[in-house]
Amino acid sequence: MLICKITMNYIVIRQLELALLQMIHQFNGLLGAIQSVLQGKLPTSLINPTTLQGILRKLFFQLSEMYKLIVGKRTDKLYL
C-alpha cells in the first residue's frame, strides 16, 4: 500500500512538472510574438494560417502593379 502511494505521488509530481514545462514553453512563444509586434513584424504564431493567407491575399490585391510582396521563408524574417 505504501509503495502504491509513493508511485502515485511520483506520477502526480511528473505530471505537474510536464504541465509547468509546457506553460513555460507557451509563455516564451507568447513573449517572442509580443517582441515581434513591438518591432513592427507580423508574428505568425498569434494568427492561424488561414487568417494569414487572407491577409496576404488582400494585401497583394491592394498593391499597385509596380510593387511586389516579399515574404521571407523564416518566421523571424517575415516582413510585409
Image (cartoon, rainbow, N blue to C red):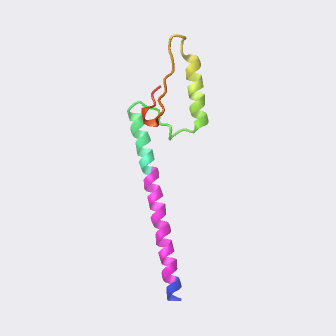
Q: Quadrant of residue 64?
A: top right
At x 59%, y 30%, the residue is: 53
At x 51%, y 21%, the residue is: 69
Q: Nearer the viewer, residue 67 or 55?
A: 67
Query: Where in the figure is residue 10, as x and y percent of width and height?
Result: 47, 76
Residue placed furthest toward the bottom:
1
Q: Nearer the viewer, residue 72 or 9?
A: 72
Query: Where in the figure is residue 15, as x and y percent of width and height?
Result: 50, 67
Q: How many marks?
A: 0
Left or right of 17 on screen, residue 49: right
Q: Using the image, determine if residue 12 lies above or below residue 30.
A: below
At x 46%, y 56%, the residue is: 23
Q: Quadrant of residue 36?
A: top left
Residue placed furthest toward the top:
66
Left or right of 38 on screen, residue 51: right
Query: Where in the figure is residue 58, as x and y percent of width and height?
Result: 59, 23
Name the main secondary structure of what is drawn in magenta. Answer: helix
Q: Which residues are magenta?
A: 5-26
Query: Where in the figure is residue 22, as x and y percent of width and height?
Result: 47, 57
Magenta stretch: includes residue 43:
no
